[in-house]
Image (cartoon, helix red, strand yellow):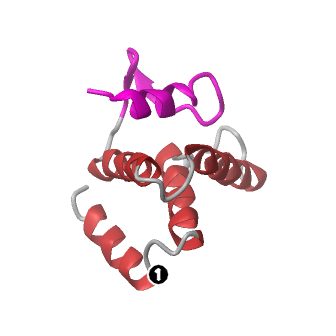
Amino acid sequence: MQLRFEHFAVTSMMGSETSPPRDYGTLKFERFWEERAFGIALALSKKGHYEWEDFRQELITAIAQWEATHCKDDPSWDYYQRWLQALEQLVFEFNLIDADEWEKRTVELMKHE
């Protein structure tokens, strides 16, 4: 169930290059960590650690960086890798976690694939 903030965050991205993958209108997560990364980004913004627009802009930057070095039909494209890259950038920028702890938690999260 989406609350007001979650609804705002998701709908603010609809129809743009930052729009999350969907399957029949529902957010689509193929791997366990994708859903977790999505939720963490929303939760940190909702708690006031950064503005949602800051995250959205960081995601746009991460996507643009990938597109600058890859063909648009490159099969290695992964939306949630860009999402994770944007999240990582913000948690470091706002000193929410140190690099060692981030690495430890990311490795733990990826074990669930």
- Farthest front residue in view: 48
Residue 60's image quarter?
Answer: top right
Horizontal and vertical percent position of residue 65 = 72, 55
The stretch of residues the image draws in magenta is: 1-28
The image shows residue 37, relative to residue 3, as above or below, that is below
Front residue of this view, candidates 111 and 75: 111
- Farthest left residue in view: 112
Front residue of this view, candidates 60 and 47: 47
Residue at 42% over, 27% down:
7
The image shows residue 10, relative to residue 44, as above or below, that is above
Side of 112 where 13 appears, left or right = right
Residue of label 1? 99
The image shows residue 94, relative to residue 23, as above or below, that is below
Residue at 56% over, 63% down:
90
What quarter of the picture does the N terminus occupy? top left
What quarter of the picture does the C terminus occupy? bottom left
Neighbour tally class for label 1: few under 14, some 14-19, many 20 plus, Cα within 10 Å: few
Residue at 49% over, 28% down:
8
Q: Secondary structure at mark 1?
A: helix
Horizontal and vertical percent position of residue 102 = 40, 74
- Farthest top residue in view: 24
The number of discs equals 1
Query: Disc 1 residue type?
Result: Ala
Front residue of this view, candidates 113 and 54: 54
Side of 11 where 72 appears, left or right = right
Q: Is residue 95 magenta?
A: no
Horizontal and vertical percent position of residue 70 = 71, 51
- Farthest right residue in view: 68
Residue at 26% over, 70% down:
108
Horizontal and vertical percent position of residue 19 = 56, 31
Q: Is residue 26 magenta?
A: yes
